[in-house]
Image (cartoon, helix red, strand yellow):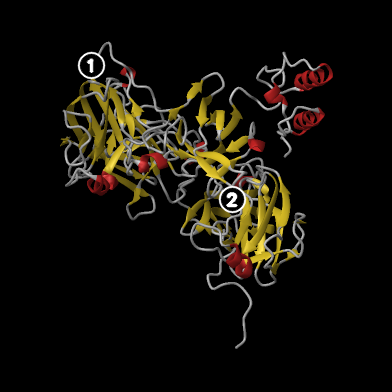
């Protein structure tokens, strides 16, 4: 029998070593990504100083280390232990039974590195990782000015951005007067940056005869194929710049004058006739709804297409007469039509009249989007019951219900949300069955209703949102519009009540301050409004013992969350709001990390591990970072003024010269963390001030 030497059948590769590689356990490690053809990669930005590591084509089973199996079967390493790795150089590995041989690599926390392992050659290398460029927009830039405007070759122009149509990025310019011999030259530009442009040489097409042309530019991003179709049109009136689509914007179907979410009309079969059935026109505040048209969407809520793509009334506020065609102003007009609120069928004929025609006829309110809508929560003495809720009444597209809210505890605040279906049982199975049907306000955390917001339209998220509305005890009329995804609340605001505070808390959970991993119990951090951070000083009692006898580490595990669970079993709510590290396993907050920024991500249910003691934890949700210091201490803050600067160097040198510790903080002065204060701490402090990072 011939023995084959190579990877195990599972065809996986791992990096095993210090964090972020699993902290030298044979049953954990950083699994590399299979890129095909025997190439595996792993990217991390969590290397802090020097790490030691090896490669493995398998891990041991169970939750205890099995070094004999690991070293004898799976481990790939160097010839000599501690072989230092230089970025960009390829190294050859070998299977090793020596448990002491490993590679070493020095990295900087926050910088990204890519480890690449080739199982064909059993070689690897480490390189700085550069994320692939993502092209968000494609546009056309070129000449002549009749096509592209002035200036020509303008890679920053937004009006030439392309739209994805049937797999091709497309931009159309219609009704262009071009003479025989005109050369249309252009490139496709990615992200409005000449660094990403196709083809390498300009695409050039020469116009053979004078006339009016509709030009269609296409780009296939998969194979980088560029094309131009120049279609000469007849001598009749030219609809310019008709792009094949027409959109309506304004107080129509909840659009609210957002150019990026305008309502697309339907082509009725003729190239220039567009319709929209049963469109809802809502009141702008003066008894009328206003709307206009455009042939191209904007890129965001504040960016309108160039006026040449906008089509409206010749004068702003022109009435749209029911059952009659009225003249439009043609493209390059931005005036709005107006009509009383209601449901209408809208027809636009671009070639009608001199500049296009508009006609409205009476429409009908749509049928209910769902059969029923219920209000769930602290309403009508029901409480949060999956089988019971207040059924809303449907009338002309709107659901309505009168409710009375009851408080939760002593806060005087009630919470409620919506669902399109009730459950058969009020248990975890019942709640899970209606989860796809629940919806609530557009909000991160509970939506806080205030007196000033009564009667105003508020946005709904109808895609399974579990968020609720927080409101004082009282009697309210609630309306829900599922066509426009809006809700309103009306009623008399109670006096002498507590206004609910918005959810914006951060909690420390786990083995902290005598607590023990209950999803509804944690240490609430204090918000420092001036510095926009959350802080808390907490104690870890060292209830877990790790390490060899005589050299034990007394540690605790903890996490962070923006929201606690509703009860001691509500892990789903907790985990959906957890803050943690991307590092696999438990992130070890070592003494070297005291005072350093630790990156946070959400949601992720990774825990942190920390030695016994009292610490001050600071969380910045804007930067998504956490800083941990020993309580009462800030590494390097020798003069105890809450800052680390050159004055601390002077204070430390003064202490070493005269021995007077009355004006300094000796704990903070131990800059190199060797439990002694000496000249080495001066060097460590100066290095920190020069480099911005504490050396190991």
Question: In which quarter of the view is residue 643 placed?
Answer: top right
Counting from the top left corner in percent of width and height, residue 546 is at: 55, 45
* Label 1 vs label 2, nearer the camera: 1
Counting from the top left corner in percent of width and height, residue 47 is at: 66, 47
User: Can residue 355 be seen?
Assistant: no
Residue at which label 2 appears = 134
In what element is the residue under mark 1? loop
**Residue in view at x 56 percent, y 38 percent:** 610
Residue 678 sits above or below residue 365 on the image: above
Q: In this view of the protein, which residue sits in the foreground, 526 or 243?
A: 526
Q: In this view of the protein, which residue sits in the foreground, 497 or 456?
A: 497
Residue at which label 1 appears = 492
Between discs 1 and 2, the one toward the N terminus? 2
User: For the residues marked 1 and 2, what is the alpha-carbon distance in whole angstroms?
Assistant: 51 Å
Q: Is residue 624 left or right of residue 403?
A: right
Q: In this view of the protein, which residue sits in the foreground, 647 or 533?
A: 647
**Residue in view at x 45 percent, y 51 percent:** 236
Q: In this view of the protein, which residue sits in the foreground, 463 or 318?
A: 463
Image quarter where the C terminus lies is top right
């Amino acid at each position: 029998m011939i023995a084959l030497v190579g990877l195990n059948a599972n065809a996986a590769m791992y990096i095993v070593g210090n964090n972020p590689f699993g902290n030298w356990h044979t049953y954990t490690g950083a699994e590399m990504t299979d890129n095909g053809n025997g190439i595996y990669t792993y990217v991390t930005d969590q290397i802090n100083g020097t790490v030691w590591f090896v490669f493995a084509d398998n891990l041991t089973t169970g939750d205890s280390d099995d070094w004999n199996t690991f070293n004898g079967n799976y481990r790939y390493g160097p010839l000599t232990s501690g072989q230092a790795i230089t970025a960009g150089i390829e190294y050859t590995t070998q299977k090793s039974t020596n448990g002491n041989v490993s590679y070493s690599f020095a990295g900087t926390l926050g910088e990204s590195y890519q480890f690449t392992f080739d199982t064909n050659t059993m070689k690897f290398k480490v390189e700085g990782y550069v994320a692939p460029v993502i092209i968000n927009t494609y546009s056309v830039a070129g000449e002549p000015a009749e096509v592209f405007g002035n200036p020509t070759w303008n890679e920053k122009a937004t009006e030439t951005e392309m739209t994805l149509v049937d797999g091709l990025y497309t931009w159309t310019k219609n009704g262009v007067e071009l003479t025989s011999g005109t050369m249309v030259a252009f490139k496709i530009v990615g992200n409005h940056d000449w660094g990403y442009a196709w083809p390498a040489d300009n695409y050039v097409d020469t116009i053979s005869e004078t006339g009016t042309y509709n030009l269609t530019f296409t780009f296939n991003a998969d194979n980088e194929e560029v094309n131009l179709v120049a279609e000469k049109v007849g001598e009749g009136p030219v609809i310019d710049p008709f792009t094949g689509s027409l959109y309506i914007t304004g107080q129509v179907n909840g659009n609210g004058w957002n150019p990026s979410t305008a309502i697309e009309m339907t082509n009725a079969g003729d190239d220039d006739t567009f319709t929209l059935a049963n469109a809802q026109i809502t009141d702008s505040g003066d008894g009328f709804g206003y709307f206009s048209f455009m042939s191209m969407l904007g890129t965001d809520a504040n960016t309108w297409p160039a006026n040449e793509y906008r089509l409206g009334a010749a004068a702003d506020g022109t009435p749209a007469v029911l059952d009659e065609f009225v003249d439009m102003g043609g493209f390059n007009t931005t005036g709005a039509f107006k009509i009383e609120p209601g449901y209408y069928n809208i027809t636009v004929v671009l070639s009608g009249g001199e500049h296009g025609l508009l006609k409205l006829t009476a429409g009908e309110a749509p049928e209910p989007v769902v059969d029923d809508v219920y209000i769930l929560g602290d309403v009508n003495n029901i409480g949060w019951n999956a089988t019971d809720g207040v059924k809303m009444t449907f009338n002309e597209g709107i659901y309505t219900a009168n409710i009375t809210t009851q408080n939760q505890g002593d806060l005087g605040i009630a919470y409620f949300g919506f669902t399109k279906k009730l459950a058969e049982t009020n248990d975890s199975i019942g709640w899970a069955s209606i989860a796809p049907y629940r919806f609530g306000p557009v909000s991160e955390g509970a939506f806080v209703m205030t007196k000033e917001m009564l009667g105003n339209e508020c946005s709904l998220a109808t895609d399974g949102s579990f968020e609720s509305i927080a409101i004082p005890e009282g009697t309210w009329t609630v309306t829900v519009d599922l066509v426009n995804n809006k809700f309103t609340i009306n009623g008399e605001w109670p006096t002498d009540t507590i206004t609910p505070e918005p959810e914006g808390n951060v909690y420390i959970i786990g083995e902290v301050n005598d607590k023990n991993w209950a999803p509804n119990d944690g240490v609430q951090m204090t918000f420092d409004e001036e510095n926009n951070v959350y802080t808390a000083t907490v104690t870890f009692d060292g209830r877990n013992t790790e390490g060899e006898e005589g050299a034990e580490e007394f540690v605790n595990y903890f996490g962070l969350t923006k929201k606690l669970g509703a009860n001691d079993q509500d892990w789903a709510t907790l985990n959906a709001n957890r803050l943690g590290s991307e590092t696999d396993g438990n992130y070890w907050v070592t003494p070297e990390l005291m005072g350093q920024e630790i990156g946070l991500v959400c949601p992720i249910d990774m825990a942190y591990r920390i030695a016994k003691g009292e610490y001050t934890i600071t969380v910045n949700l804007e930067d998504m970072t956490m800083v941990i210091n020993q309580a009462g201490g800030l590494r390097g803050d020798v003069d105890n003024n809450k800052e680390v600067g050159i004055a601390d160097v002077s204070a430390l040198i003064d202490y070493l010269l005269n021995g007077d510790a009355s004006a300094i903080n000796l704990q903070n002065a131990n800059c190199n963390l060797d439990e002694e204060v000496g000249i080495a701490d001066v060097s460590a402090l100066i290095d920190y001030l020069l480099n911005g990072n504490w050396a190991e």
